Structures are given as structure tokens and as C-alpha cells.
Image (cartoon, grey):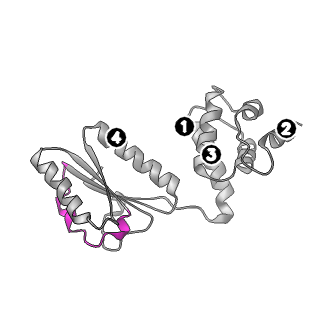
């Protein structure tokens, strides 16, 4: 990671999961994580306190600045160093923050007409990351049963992967799907068996 990184985009689930992964890695490496809201009226004082902590106690930090599009003055970025990493998180690009594209990660929601396809691809990848496979047709039925929310789909993939060691089958889905839609998932799964 560079001394500064911006994670932005309107896809909250993917953006937050990426930030959580980065922060977890940095904390495991010995850094202290300090969350700061870019919307805080005491932003300057919070930054001064965090930066003085680093220099006084010789402590390695990662500053996680949420709502960074609301930060008005980025002069504090001059303190970014090997010991002080700054991770900006926001839905939009902060107007006055200029970072090289290689230090910016964007997570955008797909257009509504591609949402079902994106959710199906996501569900397949979630299962794959857990060592499981699934037929695309079956994954699409899961998306239609529980919806396109990536958080829900991630949880459904976790449940299904706990019940099998290989490919996810209709039988596995029968016992794992949550009834979140108007049409119960078991009705959809039963129709697949025929």
C-alpha cells in the first residue's frame, strides 16, 4: 500500500469489504487504526491528536478517514509516511484530493439493467472463493429468490459452502436458502428438480 489510498464508489458492500480487508491487514502488521469522519467538526483536532500520538509514542498508524469527500483541507496529507498511512473512504471523489489512479480503488454499482447479471456473477465468485462451484442457471435462481443485495448473497454463499465441499446442488440450496422473497426459495428449488 502507498502512504495514501482512496477507496470510493457507490457500491457500499464491496467498498466497505475492501476497506475492512485493508484495515485488518494493516492492524495485523502492527499499526494502530484510528477512524476519523471527514464530516467531523473537530476534524483538525482529531488529526492533530492522531499525528502527535504517532510522533510522541513512535507508533505506526493507519488513519481511516470516512466521508472524505467532505474534507475541505487536505494539507494534513503531507504527514503521510511509512509510519502514517492514510486511507480515504468516500462515495464520491473528494474534489481537492489528487492521487495517482494506481492508489485509487473504485466500486461502482452496475446499471439497473445489469444488476441481476452482476449479482449472479458475484454469487458464483463468492462460492468459488470458498472452494465451491455452482451452475450458472442455479446461481441465477438463487439471485431471483433472495434478491440482488451483495451482502445477502455473500451470506447465502457462506451458508451453502458450509453444507457442501464441492458443487452446490439443489439439495444444498433447499436446506440453506432464506425465504426473503414473495416466492419462497423452496418453490423455486422444487421447480428446478422437475
Q: For numbered disc 1, what is the local secondary structure?
A: helix
Farthest residue, direction left: 56
How far apart in space, not on screen, are marks 3 and 4 (Cα)? 24 Å
Distance, label 1 to label 4, CA atoms, is 18 Å
Mark 2: which secondary structure?
Answer: helix
Q: Which element carries disc 3, helix, strand or loop?
A: helix
Which numbered marker is on residue 92? none
Please give the name of the residue rendered at 35% of the width and 74% of the height, measured from the top-left corner: 95
Residue contact between numbered discs 4 and 2, judged by CB atoms under 8 Å: no
Lower sequence index among marks 3 and 1:
1
107 to the left or right of 189: left
- Residue 104 position in % (x across, y down): 37, 60
The answer to whether the residues at label 3 and label 4 have Cβ atoms under 8 Å apart is: no
Q: Which mark is residue 25?
A: 4
Position of 121 compared to 40: left or right? Answer: right
Pointer 2 residue: 190
Horizontal and vertical percent position of residue 164: 65, 26
Measured along the vertical axis of the image, is residue 146 above or below residue 193?
below
- Depth check: 192 or 45 in front? 45
Which residues are drawn in magenta?
Answer: 67-83
Residue 153 - label: 3
- Circle number at residue 129: 1
Mark 3 / mark 4, whichever is N-terminal: 4
Amino acid at each position: 500500500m502507498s502512504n495514501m489510498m482512496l477507496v470510493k464508489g457507490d457500491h457500499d458492500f464491496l467498498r466497505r469489504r475492501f476497506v475492512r480487508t485493508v484495515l485488518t491487514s494493516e492492524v495485523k502488521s502492527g499499526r494502530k487504526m484510528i477512524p476519523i469522519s471527514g464530516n467531523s467538526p473537530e476534524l483538525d483536532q482529531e488529526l492533530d491528536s492522531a499525528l502527535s500520538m504517532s510522533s510522541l509514542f513512535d507508533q505506526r498508524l493507519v488513519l481511516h478517514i470516512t466521508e472524505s469527500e467532505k474534507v475541505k483541507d487536505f494539507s494534513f496529507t503531507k504527514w503521510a509516511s511509512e509510519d502514517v498511512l492514510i486511507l480515504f473512504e468516500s462515495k464520491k471523489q473528494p474534489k481537492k484530493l489528487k492521487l495517482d489512479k494506481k492508489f485509487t480503488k473504485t466500486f461502482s454499482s452496475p446499471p439497473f439493467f445489469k444488476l441481476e447479471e452482476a449479482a449472479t456473477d458475484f454469487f458464483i465468485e463468492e462460492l468459488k472463493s470458498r472452494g465451491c462451484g455452482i451452475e450458472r442457471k442455479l446461481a441465477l435462481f438463487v439471485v431471483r429468490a433472495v434478491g440482488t443485495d451483495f451482502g445477502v448473497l455473500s451470506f447465502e454463499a457462506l451458508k451453502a459452502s458450509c453444507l457442501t465441499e464441492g458443487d452446490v446442488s439443489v439439495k444444498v440450496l433447499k436446506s440453506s436458502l432464506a425465504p426473503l422473497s414473495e416466492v419462497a426459495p423452496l418453490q423455486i428449488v422444487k421447480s428446478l428438480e422437475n
